[in-house]
Image: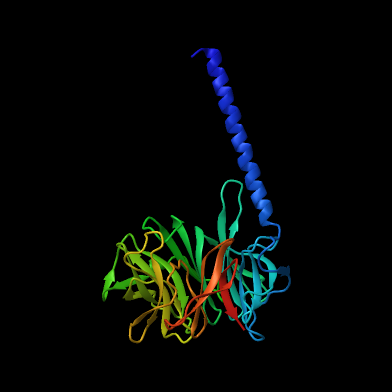
């Protein structure tokens, strides 16, 4: 090949690559622009005041994922009409939860080179009262029934629970004092009735009891997961059941909803929803037969709400907590719900 022909080939390749780059930028820009405009279908969303205070009509507060100017904002609907018109707050979160007038909002902070993440503790009017750095991609968030404690989980390696090549960091903060437990890995672990130590220990999916001392979470080690009961005073976690991920404690503190890996399911969708009776350790499979990668929320003593993939990110569904009935979609383009009032 002559020098002139090589130059022409390189020039042609440069033009093609440049055109591809321009197309990618324009396509991404157009997609981002579409995200900011209301689509012809989907829920109606308008700006307004959103409160986390108790009292008044029951309501659901969640991250709105409908495309438009209020995408990713905390929004509110009556609990009796979860698919109805939404009131958007202007506060954006990736993950969210609230109880007793306290909210935790996990946010991305967009940077020129890479994103960082933070946890905001919100009061009942969505004002930030405390702020913490989050060491990775936000995954789970919870608030204790009293509103005194908040917790979050972040991926610090990997970005999916489906495989085994990930690591997580679970943190707990006291809203009253600001004290932060930066990692549950600092707690003493009891597994099989004996003290346990391993370099591969991971925790995620904290859920609180009503005494501001006891919590439950997932412990993973050696390729297995365990439900652990934690004690904030003794800084101890004790394994109480196997094959439990993303636990959610019921309002009466007697049951745990969770996702369980079931043999024979695809590696990227291995979970089914179960409820564990903590008194008898009896497991009940729920009527939802799709794989649920979420930390379910107790909307009431007899109902669980959880997210499944949808057209614009995720939709919320509900199912009876006793294994009866059938699942039902209750809200499109929504995730991270909290039930208040």
Q: In the drawing, does residue 27 fall left or right of residue 231? A: right
In the image shown, does 2 or 327 lie closer to the viewer?
327
| Image-quadrant location for residue 72 | bottom right
- Quarter assignment of residue 38: bottom right
Res 70 visible: yes
166, above or below 173, in the image: above
Name the residue located 53 percent from the left edge and 18 percent from the top edge.
6
Number of marks in picture? 0
Name which residue lies at 53% across and 73% down.
317
Q: Quadrant of the C terminus?
A: bottom right
Residue 105 position, x and y percent, is 59, 67
Q: How is the image coloured?
A: rainbow
Asked whether, in this view, residue 142 is left or right of residue 285, the answer is right
Q: Position of residue 5 (x, y in %)?
A: 54, 16
Residue 121 in the image, given as x and y percentages of width and height = 59, 70
Instruction: Tell me if I can see residue 98 in this picture.
Output: no
Point out residue 102 in the picture as x, y percentages from the top left corner.
60, 76
């Amino acid at each position: 090949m002559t020098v002139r022909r090589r130059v022409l080939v390189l020039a042609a390749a440069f033009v093609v690559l440049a055109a591809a780059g321009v197309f990618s930028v324009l396509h991404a820009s157009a997609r981002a622009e579409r995200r900011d405009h209301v689509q012809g279908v989907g829920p109606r969303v308008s700006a307004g005041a959103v409160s986390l205070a108790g009292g008044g009509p029951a309501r659901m507060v969640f991250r709105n994922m409908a495309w438009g100017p209020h995408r990713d904002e905390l929004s509110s609907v009556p609990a009796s009409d979860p698919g109805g018109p939404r009131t958007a707050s202007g506060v954006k979160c990736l993950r969210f939860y609230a109880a007793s007038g306290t909210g935790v909002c996990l946010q991305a902070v967009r940077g020129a080179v890479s994103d960082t993440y933070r946890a905001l503790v919100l009061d009942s009017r969505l004002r930030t009262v405390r702020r913490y750095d989050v060491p990775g991609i936000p995954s789970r968030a919870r608030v204790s029934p009293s509103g005194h404690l908040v917790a979050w989980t972040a991926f610090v390696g990997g970005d999916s629970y489906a495989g085994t090549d990930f690591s997580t960091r679970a943190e707990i903060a006291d809203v009253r004092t600001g004290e932060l437990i930066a990692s549950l890995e600092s707690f003493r672990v009891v597994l099989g009735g004996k003290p346990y130590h391993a370099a591969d220990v991971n925790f995620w999916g904290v859920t609180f009891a009503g005494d501001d001392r006891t919590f439950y979470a997932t412990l993973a080690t050696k390729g297995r997961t365990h439900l652990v009961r934690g004690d904030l005073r003794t800084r101890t976690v004790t394994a109480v059941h196997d094959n439990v991920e993303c636990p959610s404690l019921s309002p009466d503190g007697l049951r745990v909803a969770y996702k369980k890996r079931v043999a024979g399911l695809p590696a990227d969708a291995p979970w089914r929803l179960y409820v564990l009776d903590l008194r008898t350790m009896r497991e009940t499979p729920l009527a939802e037969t799709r794989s649920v990668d979420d930390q379910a929320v107790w909307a009431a003593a007899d109902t669980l709400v959880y997210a499944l993939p949808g057209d614009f990110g995720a939709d919320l569904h509900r199912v009876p907590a006793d294994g009866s009935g059938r699942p039902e979609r209750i809200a499109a383009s929504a995730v991270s719900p909290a039930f208040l009032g």
